[in-house]
Amino acid sequence: MNHHVVIGAGPVGSGIATLLAARGEAVTVITRSGSGPTHALISKVRADAADTEALVHAATGAATIFNCANPPYHQWATAWPPVHQALMAAAERTGAVLVMMDNLYAFGPGTSMPMREHDAMNATGEKGSVRARMAHDLMAAHASGRLRATLARASDFYGPHVIGAALGERVLPNVLAGKKVSLLGALDIPHSVSFMPDVVTTMVTIAGDERAWGKPWHVPNAPAVSQRTTIEAFATAAGTTVKVGAVPKAALSALGLFSPMMRALKETWYQFAEPWVTDSALTEQTFGLSATPLSEGAAATVAWWRARPAVSK
């Protein structure tokens, strides 16, 4: 029986652990709190993802280490480097394939659209530069033979279990209640979004296919539509009517005086003010994967949120 180690128990980590366990494979989920999904084949371990020795102990004999960690948004510059280095060291010492959940920040503002896997990583902001260095270090380590690794890049998450995200708790409860939704940036330009089950499937697929190792891959996304159209898809699935408004950049600056999270969002404003579109043709053609249509993803998202007891209907 294969054994896998998953770092993090958010929607990506929990989704990967649950999918692998359903396939009959053993999984160890590592978080600081010892949390994670419940399944007979899932073990939950309390440890710091920056603790190399703890990671090596957990990953000895494992086929894969999935990096699904998610440090606080405004602490990426300080929190990510020790975690990333510990994970690479653990992969090197155990021989496990290291699979990193990545995003699109490394491309930076002004990048050509649609974004493709091997486009230049030109990010200049703090968070984008951190992600660019991580991706570069990981691929360079693989190329040198130090370890085996790959990564999957996704856009903004939506779907079941996605809560603390742009299309999570700030949006779906309002959609279900027929209340106004406020979004960052422009409302009527194309913006790719990633359905969580598609993210999970991509991560598991590239982990087990040697063709994926040493390269970045883009999660298959449905054709990019505007933020307004995405919210309308949620509202259609919910049977509600929702007004959509834009948060002015000046308001974000004001909120940033009191919230580190809001202050950190200023760096990525361009992702919502300009077209933000991915190309996942390479992933789809190589592995036979496809994106869930937005209407189906929206219906599954609404159904999951409706099942949550704390959500007003």
Image (tube, grey):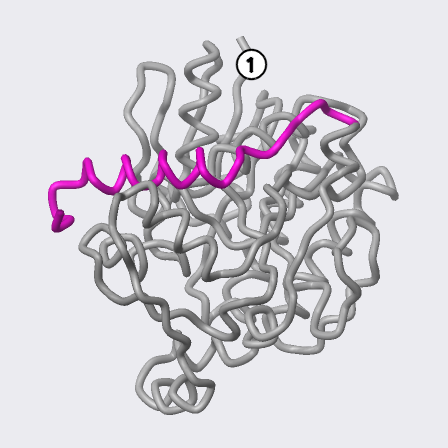
Q: Quadrant of residue 10?
A: top left
Whole-percent x, y for residue 136 in the image: 77, 56
Whole-percent x, y for residue 74 in the image: 45, 72
Residue closer to the observer: 292 or 75: 292
Label 1's element?
A: loop
Q: Residue at x 54, y 38 (%)?
A: 199
Q: Is residue 142 magenta?
A: no
Q: Is residue 54 visible?
A: no
Q: Judge left or right: residue 36 versus residue 266.
A: left
Q: Residue at x 71, y 77 (%)?
A: 124
Q: Is residue 306 magenta?
A: yes
Label 1 neighbour load within 10 Å: few <14, some 14-19, many 20+ = few
Q: Judge left or right: residue 49 versus residue 128.
A: left
Residue ID for mark 1: 2
Q: Quadrant of residue 28?
A: top left
* Above or below for 115 versus 15: below
Outermost residue toward the right in this view: 144
Highlighted magenta segment, given as a residue range: 286-313
